[in-house]
Image (tube, helix red, strand yellow):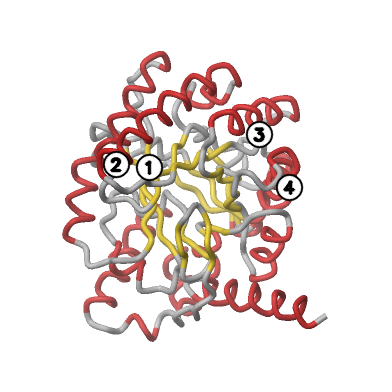
Amino acid sequence: MYDLLRPLLFALDAETAHGLTLYGLDVAQRSELLRFVAKPAAELPVDAFGIRFPNPVGLAAGLDKNADHLDALGALGFGFVEVGTVTPRPQAGNPKPRLFRLPQHEAIINRMGFNNAGVDALLRNVDKSGYRGVLGINIGKNKDTPNERAADDYLLCLERVYDRATYITVNISSPNTQGLRDLQEETTLRRFIDTLRERQEQLGSQGGARKPMLLKIAPDLSEQEQDGVAEALLASGIDGVICTNTTVDRALVANDPNGQETGGLSGRPLFAHSTEVLRGMRRRLGERVPIVGVGGILEGSDAAEKLDAGACLVQLYSGLIYRGPRLIAECVDEIRRQRESRNAA
C-alpha cells in the first residue's frame, strides 16, 4: 500500500507529507486498518542495557518528537520506539522550509532545530497513550540555553522523563542547534556526562528502578575526537551509545538540487560512514558499552551489517520514508536469517 501512496506523498512538501503520514497512521490504527499497511515483525528477543527488547529493530528519535503518535507507531512491529528530541520549554525550531528529500540518493536533509512542544506536553502524550512497549525518550537543550548551562536543561529533562521512559537518550550531536556538538569535546563531555550520571543514579535509588542512559554521537568526529569520546564513555560508566546522528558532509550528494541545503543529512549516503564510526567505537569500547546502530538503513541487509559491525540494536528513520513500514519486518527477518545461518554453519 505504501508503494501506491508514496508518489502522492512525494508530490507534497516534505514536512507536510510527514504530518499527513503520521495523521494517516493514527487514523489507520484507530480504525484497525493498520494491519493492511504493515506486517507486524515477528519476535526476535534481544537483551541490552538490562532491558528485554522484543526484537532489535527500533524507531529512531525525530519522527515523533512529542510522542503524539505512540499507539500507531508501536503497532508497526518495532522492538522499541524512541521519541523526541524534547527540550525543557516548547520551541518552534528553525524557519521553514527545513526538511528536504533527495530521492535519487534515498536521502533526507533536515534542519528542524529541536522543534517540540516541551517536556511536559510529551509526558502528557505518553500518559494518555496505550503503548506499553520499550520507550526511549531523547532529551536535548533549548536553543537559547548557552552551553555553559546546557547541563541544567538536560538534568531537568532527565528528571521529568525518568519515570515514564524505559531508557533515556542524551542528544548532543544534532547539527541543527548551534554549538551543540561542542559538548562532545572530551574534557567538556566528561564533566557533562558525570553530572548526568550522578543524577541518574540518584533517581534510580529514589525510585527503586534504574533507567539506562545512552549518548547519541555525531558521525563527523575525527579519529582523535572519537578516541576522546570513547575514553569519556568508558570513564563515565554510561549504559550505551547510539552511532550515529546525521552528517554535515555533502560529498556524496553535492550534485543534488537540494544537496547544499544546510542541516543534517540522513539516509543511504550516511550508511557507510555511520557504520564505520560504529565499528571504530566498538573497537575502542570493547564489549563494555552496548551500541545502537543507526544511519542509512534502507534494506534488511543494512540492519544485519550494523549488527556485524558491533551493534546490538538498530534504529530506522529515513528508510521508512523511502521504503515504508514493511522495512521493519524485512530487517527483523534478515537479522534472523543471518543469525540462523551462522548457527547452522
Is label 4 or label 2 in front?
Answer: 4
Residue sitting at 59 percent across and 49 percent down? 290
Q: Quadrant of residue 96?
A: top left
Amino acid found under the numbered disc labelled 2: Asn
Which residue in the structure is indicated by mark 2? Answer: 116
Amino acid found under the numbered disc labelled 3: Asp
Per the model, the C-alpha gap separating discs 4 and 2 is 32 Å
Residue sitting at 42 percent across and 17 percent down? 147
- Check contact, mark 3 vs mark 2: CB within 8 A: no
**Residue 322 picture location, percent across and down:** 54, 65
Amino acid found under the numbered disc labelled 4: Arg
Of callouts 1 and 3, the N-terminal one: 1
**Residue 225 picture location, percent across and down:** 68, 26
Is label 3 or label 4 in front?
Answer: 4
Which residue in the structure is indicated by mark 4? Answer: 279
Return the mark for residue 85.
Answer: 1
- Check contact, mark 1 vs mark 3: CB within 8 A: no
112 to the left or right of 249 = left
Mark 1, secondary structure of its residue: strand
